[in-house]
Amino acid sequence: QKEVEQDPGPLSVPEGAIVSLNCTYSNSAFQYFMWYRQYSRKGPELLMYTYSSGNKEDGRFTAQVDKSSKYISLFIRDSQPSDSATYLCAMSANNFNKFYFGSGTKLNVKP
Amino acid sequence: GAVVSQHPSRVICKSGTSVKIECRSLDFQATTMFWYRQFPKQSLMLMATSNEGSKATYEQGVEKDKFLINHASLTLSTLTVTSAHPEDSSFYICSAGPGLGITAEGTQYFGPGTRLLVL
């Protein structure tokens, strides 16, 4: 079993839709949870960061962490064509520790 | 803030030559830098974890004599692919973090990547 599971997609939605991206994990020691956005042939860009459980909102993006279910989500409201990218979840157990990545979900927002 | 650069962005070399890739944190200091490899349409594969002033820790299956990592300062790490072969062609990405006193705990910031093509 992989440490982190993520549906690879592709996920195709119309512009303006609400997008829900999810990851599940097996290691209860994970405390740091990140979402990265990666455009083709570019390095990943940090979108959202959450420590432990709870919700975090930044503009059109909301990250949720449910440690009891070992489940994290990223919601994108009013999706735009520029949101079309691959979204990677990442998590780690300790500060300075290595990350465990999901496989990435490819999102396509159609105009 | 929290910008990481990589140089070169793209390199083409002949089989058997060595290639050096630099990773710099431009506006923060990071005790830890990571090197990843990414194949098309796949996620990131961690190659090694590099701490300033000490030897890198390599992931299982990664040849440390082939992928030499040097972490000379809190803002610079280098990856040298020695005696490169076509199968080493890939997208290499570094990350740094967390930044001392600047970025949140547990975070990593990625460089733009280096595309290596070995002929």
Image (cartoon, helix red, strand yellow):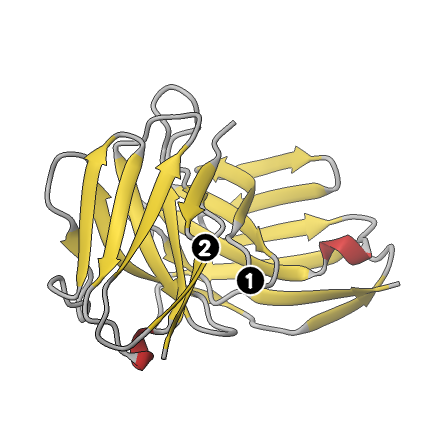
Residue sitting nearer the eye, A1 or B112: B112
**A19 relative to A98 in the view: left or right:** right
Image location of residue B112, percent across then percent down: 49, 50
Left or right: B53 with respect to B76? left
Estimate the x, y position of residue B115 in percent, counting from the top left: 44, 63
The answer as to whether the residues below labels 2 and 1 share one chain is no
**Which chain is indicated by disc 2?**
B
Residue A101 position by quadrant: bottom left
A102 or B75, which is in the foreground? B75
For badge 2, the amino acid type reads Gly
Residue B20 placement (x, y as % from top left): 28, 55
SS class of the residue under badge 2? loop
Disc 1 crowd, CA 10 A, few/some/many (<14, 14-19, 20+)? few
Disc 2/disc 1 C-alpha distance (Å): 8 Å
Determine which residue is flagged by label 2. Answer: B113
The numbered dot on residue A22 is none
The kind of secondary structure element at disc 1 is loop
Residue at image location 45% in from the left, 47% down from the top: A67
Q: Please, is residue A108 above or below residue A76 in the view? A: below
Mark 2 and 1 residues: CB-CB less than 8 Å, in contact?
yes
For the C terminus of chain B, give its image quadrant. Answer: bottom left
Residue A96 seen from this side: no
- At 71% from the left edge and 60% from the top edge, which residue is drawn? A84
> Badge 2: few (under 14), some or many (20 or more) residues near its Cα, within 10 Å?
many
Residue B50 appears left or right of B89: left
Chain designation of label 1:
A
Amino acid type for the residue under numbered disc 1: Arg
Check residue A41 in the rendering and tell me which mark sits there, or answer none.
Answer: 1
Res. A67 visible in picture: yes
The residue that appears at 11% across and 39% down in the rendered structure is B54
Q: As displayed, is residue A103 above or below residue A33?
A: below
Q: Quadrant of residue B59?
A: bottom left
